[in-house]
Amino acid sequence: MNGRVVVVFDVLRATTTMAAALEAGVNEILIFPDIESVRRAKPKYPAALSCGEQYCLKPEGFDLGNSPGELGAAQAGKTLLMSTTNGTKAVLAARGADRTYVGALVNARAVAEMARQSSKPLTLLCAGLKGSLAMEDVIGAGAVIQALNEDVELESDEARMAEQLFLASRDRLGQVLRSTAGGQNIIRSNLEKDIDFAARMDVIDSVGEVMDGDPIRIVRAE
Amino acid sequence: MNGRVVVVFDVLRATTTMAAALEAGVNEILIFPDIESVRRAKPKYPAALSCGEQYCLKPEGFDLGNSPGELGAAQAGKTLLMSTTNGTKAVLAARGADRTYVGALVNARAVAEMARQSSKPLTLLCAGLKGSLAMEDVIGAGAVIQALNEDVELESDEARMAEQLFLASRDRLGQVLRSTAGGQNIIRSNLEKDIDFAARMDVIDSVGEVMDGDPIRIVRAE
């Protein structure tokens, strides 16, 4: 990822939740590789809120799950300590990039604006589901490609496929996100409202940027 | 691949050429891992024709390139000795499957009919290009999924994406195949007519089936 700008997508739900958190005024999101690491870190950050999921659900003792709709004025100014199954691992996988953002359908246009500020080559990193591609992440990447429009040259068929999939899905995003493996997991967990949140294009202006450190942090990109 | 039915796709061009060869009455296609292996084997099969490509073009001394339009009545009853950059490697990668077919857009419906004869789970194996997914192979897989219609349950988002990509491309397959990385390579090699051949849906009834052996053989599936 050296010398590249990376955008990480975990549309259902981690990167959508991150965008919602920053939009709600969350100060920073500290990223941990697993739920246990969040539990161990919590005493060091007494004012922070733990946030994340395990098998889609809020882990025992956590302050927040991984539902974007949970984030609001009550969390403004707070620090989140976050770990999710796929999304936070993908953020960690992007380490070494020139700049790393987190993207979703809810802020696709804002992500494209941010990516446009750099002339470096762009990698759209789809978090996926247990080592497989997740369709909603590919559609999210396609939404950013489409928003970049004429300003990018597509380097790969993967990028072409993402754009075509987005174009084929844009008028029925809620339905398509319900049909995916990740969407079906969320419906089984009675969290269908999270799909509706994630399927709303361009309702959020905040973009998360990943900052190196231990733990790495996500803050609102300026 | 154990216990599964596999269909290998290298739409531009190997599996399209294999379908065209079998349709033209070629008796069998012997598959070799590289061009040099074909050259070494040739003296053992004095009546056979060598066939394949290197950097898209017919290798020095070969009887045939990898253009599906080259196959016709003149090759009826013949044996081909074949090696291509991606397609024949994918066929070799499928070894161990319960049954392995080679598929393309030109015979998608016939491939679906063949797959429907088995109740085993189906894997659609996209050959790709230098380790990356090739869009035309994913579209070919989507064409078979679409032809299977209600008779399959999609196990993965990859399968859902393939079907959606096919549906989004079906009315302009020639244009989409020209836009892919593989299509652009072929245009640069002045072989654009091969794209037009590969983009014609369901014009061929023959389906190649891979038979174990050394070398492995592809014959017309019955």
Image: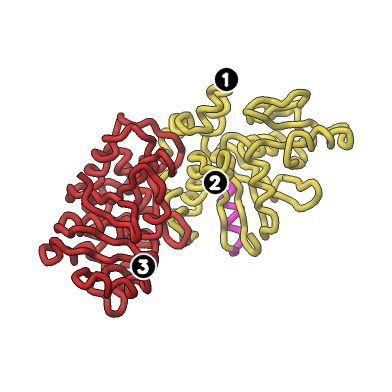
Chain colours: A yellow, B red
| Chain designation of label 3 | B
User: Residue flagged by tag 3: what amino acid is it?
Assistant: Asn
Q: Which residue corresponds to mark 2?
A: A109
Tell me the CA gap for discs 3 and 1: 48 Å
Q: Are marks 2 and 1 on the same chain?
A: yes
User: Residue at the spot x=19%, y=70% of the render?
Assistant: B47
In this view, the residue in front, B56 or B115, is B115
- Residue that carries the numbered disc 1 in the rendered image: A190
Mark carried by residue B103: none
Inspect the magenta stretch and tell me whether residue B83 lies in it.
Answer: no
Give the image quarter of residue B24. bottom left
Q: Secondary structure at mark 3?
A: helix
- Is A114 part of what is drawn in magenta? yes
Write the residue at 22% across / 62% down: B68
Above or below residue B191? Residue B16 is above
Name which residue type carries label 2: Arg
Percent across and percent down for residue B110 are 22, 43
Chain letter for mark 2, please.
A
Instruction: Specify whether B180 is left or right of B58.
Output: right
Cα gap from disc 2 to disc 1, whole angstroms: 29 Å
Q: Nearer the viewer, residue A191 or A79?
A: A191
Dot 2 lies on which element? Answer: helix
Picture coordinates of residue B180, whole percent (x, y)? 37, 59
For the question of whether residue B74 can be seen, the reply is yes
Circle 3 sits on which residue?
B185
